[in-house]
Image (cartoon, rainbow, N blue to C red):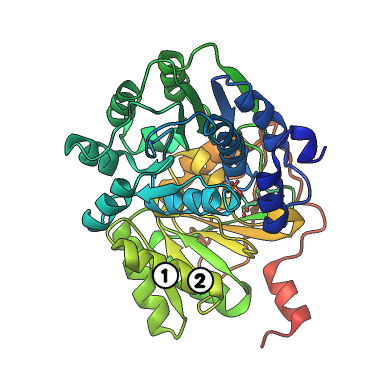
């Protein structure tokens, strides 16, 4: 299928061609016709599937057509609510790129930065607003945002929105928009609470599921190290020195953990950038830029800060701390092995994290390769736990060499 087959208009087709897209992705093929048909939708698709264009393109087309009707000034006709600032910025960049040959205007507002420039942008009049929930409600309270003309509401990354405690804000925002609007809900996974939200706000929605909830790419080699918590930093340094090369994201559960690891890696001569919720917006953007430009090759992040950020060509992901929500593991490792490339996901499991690994393996229906041969085993005398469930497949087990033998072959020392 081509973008032309999706009945998109010429200004959009031109912008799509300039973005370098040849054909629509699966989520775009399935979603675009339904959005153009003005249906409410619940779509399960992860970042990296092309989901942003899947809603941005038909929204632009609908608003482009609607624009023919004469009206005074620009009103917010489409509202996209995003859980994080980075994701909001990225979504707006997509809208800007695709609307290049239309006169539709978009803007993004988010917390953590001065409110004044955002007020100016809103005053100029825009068609599409991308916003994080808190700042949106804040500006609405100050009477600076009018949502009375919203025809299309998008809730992006709904599962993260709820994880971050935005449920009441989201419901409030939905009620501030007109009742007869079209609502599109996008979520990487559809847990029960997202389903509940969908039931309360969507009208006869069409459902689309692009990838199974917990699929992990066959191109990601997933390996597991059992290691005492106190030795995780040493193991990380050991792997960075000997095994892991290229562009890497290291995930930690806490902001404190991110900062601590940054200090250690910097002391050991590594060029590192970090992103987490306590950093100002400018600093986070700057860090991302340096990582994307290749000025640094290691980014340390918390899940919340990293979710939804589009970073290509990632060679490895290190799960320094295991996530306690198994779906988060799928999001994390989905950042590597994009577009047919190969990638490796390294997971460090401390004594107190064994139950997390069990849940992760059950979710992905795959047994991770346990690397036993490393300098910091969890319990040198005990064999690592290997789950023997029959449903778990050990795809990577066959032909796997120990780390020591690989090292010998490559003459690391
Ligand atoms: P998303 O899932 O929206 O975060 O998109 C992931 C990446 O895919 C972004 O870099 C997009 O620019 C890119 N992308 C979106 N649609 C297409 C397409 N049809 N062909 C190639 N790349 C695309």
Under circle 2, the secondary element is helix
Q: What element carries label 1?
A: helix
Spot the residue most to the left: 142
Asked whether the residues under the numbered discs 2 and 1 touch, taking CB atoms below 8 Å apart as contact, a structural biologist would say yes
Residue at 18% x, 35% y is: 141
Q: Is residue 302 left or right of residue 187?
A: left
Identify which residue, 86 or 124, lies in the foreground. Answer: 124
Q: In which quarter of the image is the N terminus?
A: top right
Q: Tell me if residue 260 comes above or below residue 7 in the rendering.
A: below
- Farthest residue, direction bottom: 413
The local crowd at label 2, few if under 14, some if 14 to 19, many if 20 or more residues have their Cα within 10 Å, is many
The picture quadrant where one finds residue 77 is top left
> Which residue is identified by label 2?
291
Whole-percent x and y of residue 231? 42, 67
Whole-number angstrom distance, CA of label 2 to CA of label 1: 6 Å
Percent x, y for residue 386? 62, 44
Most foreground residue, 27 or 114: 114
User: Would you say residue 310 is visible in this rendering?
Assistant: yes
Q: Answer above or below: position of 93 versus 412.
A: above
Which mark, residue 287? 1
User: x, y percentage for residue 120?
Assistant: 27, 53
Residue 124 position in % (x across, y down):
33, 49
Look at the picture and state if 361 lies above or below 345: above
Which residue is at the front of the view, 285 or 314? 285
Report whether 18 appears left or right of 263: right
Residue 106 is labelled as none
């Amino acid at each position: 299928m081509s973008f032309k087959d999706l009945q998109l208009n010429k200004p959009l087709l031109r912008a799509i061609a300039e973005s370098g897209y040849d054909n629509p992705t699966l989520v775009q093929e399935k979603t675009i016709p339904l959005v153009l048909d003005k249906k409410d939708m619940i779509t399960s698709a992860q970042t990296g599937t092309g989901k942003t264009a899947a809603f941005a393109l038909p929204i632009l087309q609908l608003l482009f057509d609607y624009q023919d009707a004469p009206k005074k000034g620009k009103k917010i006709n489409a509202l996209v609510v995003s859980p994080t600032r980075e994701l909001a910025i990225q979504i707006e960049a997509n809208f800007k790129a695709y609307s290049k040959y239309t006169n539709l205007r978009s803007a993004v507002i988010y917390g953590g930065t001065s409110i004044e420039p955002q007020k100016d942008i809103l005053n100029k009049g825009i068609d599409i607003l991308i916003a994080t929930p808190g700042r949106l409600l804040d500006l609405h309270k100050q009477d600076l945002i009018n949502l009375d003309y919203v025809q299309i509401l998008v809730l992006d990354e709904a599962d993260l929105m709820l994880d971050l405690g935005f449920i009441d804000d989201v419901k409030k925002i939905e009620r501030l928009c007109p009742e007869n609007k079209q609502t599109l809900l996008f979520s990487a996974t559809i847990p029960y609470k997202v389903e509940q939200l969908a039931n309360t706000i969507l009208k006869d929605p069409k459902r689309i599921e692009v990838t199974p909830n917990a699929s992990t790419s066959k191109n990601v080699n997933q390996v597991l190290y059992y290691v005492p918590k106190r030795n995780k930093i040493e193991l990380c340094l050991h792997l960075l020195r000997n095994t892991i090369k290229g562009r890497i994201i290291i995930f930690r559960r806490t902001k404190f953990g991110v900062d601590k690891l940054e200090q250690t890696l910097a002391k050991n001569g590594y060029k590192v950038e970090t992103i987490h919720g306590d950093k100002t917006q400018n600093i986070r953007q700057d860090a991302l830029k340096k990582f994307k430009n290749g000025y640094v090759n290691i980014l340390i992040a918390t899940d919340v800060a990293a979710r939804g950020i589009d970073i290509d060509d990632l060679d490895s992901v290190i799960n320094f701390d295991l996530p306690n929500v198994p779906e988060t593991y799928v999001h994390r490792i989905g950042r590597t092995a994009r577009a047919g490339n190969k990638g490796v996901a390294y997971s460090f499991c401390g004594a107190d994290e064994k139950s997390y690994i069990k849940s992760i393996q059950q979710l992905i229906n795959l047994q991770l390769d346990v690397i036993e041969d490393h300098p910091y085993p969890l319990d040198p005398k005990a064999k690592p736990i290997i789950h023997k469930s029959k449903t778990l497949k050990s795809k990577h087990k066959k032909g796997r060499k120990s780390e020591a033998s690989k090292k010998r072959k490559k003459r690391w020392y």
